[in-house]
Image (spheres, rainbow, N blue to C red):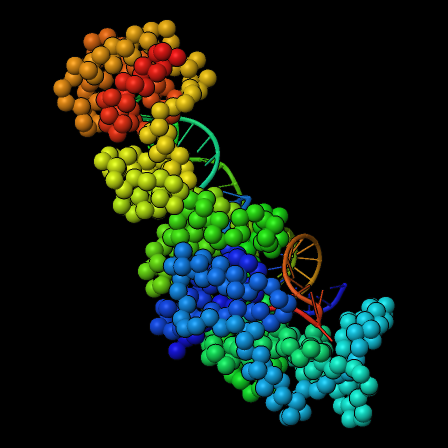
Amino acid sequence: MIVTRFAPSPTGYLHIGGLRTALLSYLWARRNGGKFLLRIEDTDFSRNDEAAARAIVEAFKWVGLEHDGEIAYQSSRLAIYQEHVQKLLDEGKAYRCYMSREELDALREEQMGRKERAKYDNRYRDFTGTPPQGREAVIRIKAPLEGTITVQDGVKGDVVFNVADILDDFIIARSDGTPTYNFVVAVDDALMGVTDVIRGDDHLSNTPKQIVVYDALGFTIPKFFHVPMIHNSEGKKLSKRDGATDVMMYKTMGYTPQALLNFLVRLGWSHGDQEIFSMEEMLSLFDPSHINRSASVYNTDKLDWLNSHYLKNTPNEALCALLEFHGVMLMDHDKREILLDALKDRAKTLVEMATLVSEILVTPASYDEGALKKGFKAESREILATFSDAMSSASELHLPTDYHHLMESVVTQLGIGFGKIGQPLRIALMGKLSGPGLDTVMAIIGVEATQERIAALLNR
RNA sequence: GGCUCCAUCAUCUAACGGUUAGGAUUUCAGGUUUUCAUCCUGGCCACAGGGGUUCAAAUCCCCUUGGAGUCACCA
């Protein structure tokens, strides 16, 4: 069985890059009928872990990813780590190091001065004497001293590290007894039965250390898939400073989860020329071994396009529900269908759509200067008045076509082109020169409101 | 700086030794539309450079250049 996991450190919200690796892990697990686990990596300082976990679960819920089982908190698994540290100690695969921070710093500086790599000098590796008084020891693992470690990566291929270049006896437990990252990751992944680790390739250079831990503890090494970074427009790793990186921001900006997921899955992965992927398609097509090796730049133009695509294809009922989050209550509106049909092709986001709704439903508070200049001419007053009168005497005005016919007959009667009535009427109804078809707008707001808006413009 | 990874249009990508290097987004030009948007049609735009290997290289190898990541008692 394939078991994957998403293991964020609690930073307060779910990052867009995190969502991508979570999505890929989720897809791979689900595709294989496996499990997708969630683990919060909170071994260090007292950051607000609970809130962070809630934020992540909330974001997962919004996009529809679901993890299996309970959320694992590393902070509550300390006993397990200690047990495994002890095991290594007992087996002589790890040892106490009494070197002080000052000594370590001094060593480092000395090495740097000689242009050497900063590296622990193994001074306590085989220490058997009496420990120095009053020193808290850290625990270091005995790492190999020579040879190579190969990370077999499903994305990058075999990556070979020279032990002498990268390793030393790294710390697995701090002087306060708490375990460090590379140790707990390996222990947890092994104990939780994770078979496929899909994560950002910023973790690639950590992997040899984790392999050392796997080996020391006799664990089976999982499959690794190191997914390339998402870069910002400067070509650097995407960070919190790059604006909208909080997944929930996309909800408030009016994006749909499908669009976001579709956008994310196409960053670094593709299936021929296909651009649109439903969740079902992602589930049946995604394979991490087809992930690109190179980083991609985060550019939301395509996200906008995808979002408008999904908006167009969302049933009105569902659209109504989505719009409620943005303060638009349309469930009981009798012209709901006409309204939404007219709008769903015109908006890139739900926020835009909400704005468009109110532009139609609410009488314009002011008129665009440029529009007046361009579209409201001397003869416009009479044309609008004529049209308004015609509305009063018309018998049946319900559907857009009814209004359209009326406009046609007025235009014919006056011997003018459509534009002569269209422009001023549009200004009266919308306050500007762009918008959905006038017949549609009138059908939505009705005869009375149309006449009121015409009067408002004429009396201004 | 050491180590590691990466390199096709502005951007996301296809190509798995043989293509006029394809698609999408963006952009531009037409068309449809009473307007705007949508939509349709078309255009512009790429194999980083240099060596090999091969009948044949965007594809395989090497070098150069450029970019990124990582080097903690953070995760």
**Could you say where residue A221 lies in the image, as x and y percent from the top left?**
53, 80
Q: Residue at x 67, y 83 (%)?
A: A141
Quadrant housing the N terminus of chain A: bottom left
Q: Is residue A99 above or below residue A415?
A: below
Which residue is painted at 25% across and 21% down in the image? A448
Q: Is residue A55 above or below residue A92?
A: above
Q: Which quadrant is home to the C terminus of chain A?
A: top left
Res A102 quadrant in image = bottom right
A329 sits to left or right of A147: left
Decide if residue A134 is on the left or right side of residue A172: right
- The image shows residue A385 at horizontal and vertical percentages of 27, 10
- Residue A428 is situated, as x and y percent measured from the top left of the image, at 34, 18
Residue A1 appears anywhere in the view: yes
Q: Residue at x 48, y 78 (%)?
A: A192
Q: Nearer the viewer, residue B64 or A288?
A: A288
Q: Residue at x 40, y 42 (%)?
A: A326
Quarter location, residue B68: bottom right
Left or right: where A8 falls relative to A362: right
As drawn, A159 above or below A303: below
Q: In the rendered image, is residue A425 in sight?
A: no
